[in-house]
């Protein structure tokens, strides 16, 4: 046996993926909980050479200090820094980290489009959740769309928007992507202009954007009745500022994550809708793809020390 591998939660890494790891000479140990505690992980991580982070646990230095044999971590998603905030400490200890950047891309972009359509067609007002039987709505056709962050998901959203006959698509990104502008038919603009001129804004930045990337100032630039679509990790949009705008009735928003404030539950669904927990990535096909990528990345790191999905 080459060593033991810890897998958390049961959503990712199905039996077929376990068999891949076993066939490669490893023993599997599962911690079948989506939110493992520090104490649980301190105990579970001991003597493991590999770790597939499939839950929503947050790694701490204490957990890493208990990892007496760990060589590599594979994160089942893109934004690993939200779950491994001590990633610098992890890598200093000689532990490699890999994520699955291409895995959830289509599913998350699909969710964002679904959410935008539902909100701009006022689905919640003219269905069993509302009181109206007939209502003329905006849709997406003819709308000016803005994308904040043109990574994998932002680019996929731009591709998906093509058949919807938008008036325009502009984007802001830390780095300008001229080749994508030509391919996708989009225009680069400063973030202030994207926010001011767009009817629909998709927020697609990574955790690297930092806490409170979108604050009261940025939200204040949005048009009246503009729609903000978000699937990013909590904290990147200032929740107090967003709640204030929503309660004032000036803008609308839809998010894969709920707001912490209970007052958000009193807002009309046509102004604020959110998931009870993150599910934007969660389709059968994407789960299988992410699982395949995580297992292969972990094996590559354990066997050769290199992988294309290794975080630098």
Image: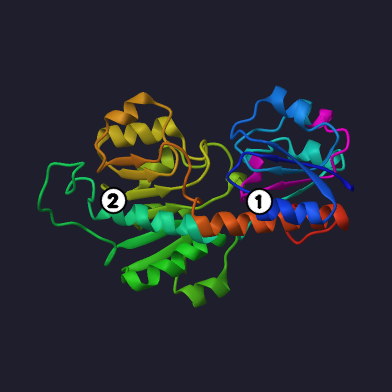
* Mark 1 secondary-structure assignment: helix
Q: Tell me the element at label 2.
A: helix
Q: Answer whether labels 2 and 1 touch (C-beta < 8 Å).
A: no
Q: Residue at x 28, y 32 (%)?
A: 247
- Mark 2 or 1, which is nearer the eye? 1
Q: Residue at x 37, y 61 (%)?
A: 145
| Between 229 and 256, the one nearer to me in the picture | 256
Residues in magenta, as a range: 64-81
**Residue 223 within the segment the image draws in magenta:** no
Residue closest to the eye, 270 or 182 = 270
| Residue at image mark 2 | 119
Is residue 71 part of the magenta span, yes or no?
A: yes
Residue 15 is marked as 1
In this image, 74 relative to 27: left or right? Answer: left
- Residue at the (70%, 33%) spot, across then down: 59
302 vs 7, left or right, is: right
């Amino acid at each position: 046996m080459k060593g033991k591998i810890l897998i958390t939660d049961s959503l990712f890494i199905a039996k077929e993926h376990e068999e891949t790891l076993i066939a490669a000479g490893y023993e599997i140990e599962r911690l079948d909980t989506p939110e493992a505690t520090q104490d649980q992980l301190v105990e579970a991580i001991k003597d493991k050479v590999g770790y597939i982070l499939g839950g929503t646990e947050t790694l701490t230095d204490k957990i890493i200090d208990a990892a007496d044999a760990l060589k590599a971590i594979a994160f089942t998603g893109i934004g690993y820094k939200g779950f491994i905030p001590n990633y610098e400490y992890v890598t200093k200890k000689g532990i490699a980290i890999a994520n699955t950047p291409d895995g959830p891309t289509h599913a998350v972009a699909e969710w964002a489009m679904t959410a935008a359509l539902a909100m701009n067609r006022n689905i919640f007002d003219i269905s069993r959740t509302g009181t109206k039987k007939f209502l003329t709505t905006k849709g997406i056709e003819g709308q000016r769309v803005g994308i904040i962050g043109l990574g994998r998901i932002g680019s996929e959203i731009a591709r998906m928007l093509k058949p919807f006959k938008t008036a325009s698509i502009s984007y802001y990104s830390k780095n300008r992507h001229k080749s994508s502008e030509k391919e996708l038919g989009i225009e680069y603009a400063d973030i202030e202009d994207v926010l001011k001129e767009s009817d629909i804004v998709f927020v697609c930045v990574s955790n690297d954007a930092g806490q409170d990337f979108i604050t009261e100032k940025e939200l204040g630039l949005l048009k009246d009745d503009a729609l903000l679509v978000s699937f990013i990790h909590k904290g990147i949009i200032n929740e107090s500022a967003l709640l204030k705008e929503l309660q004032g009735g000036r803008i609308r928003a839809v998010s894969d994550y709920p707001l912490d404030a209970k007052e958000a539950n009193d807002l009309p669904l046509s102004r604020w809708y959110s998931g009870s927990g993150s599910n934007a990535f969660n389709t059968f096909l994407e789960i299988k793809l992410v699982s395949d990528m995580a297992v292969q990345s972990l094996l590559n790191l354990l066997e050769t020390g290199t992988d294309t999905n290794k975080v630098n």
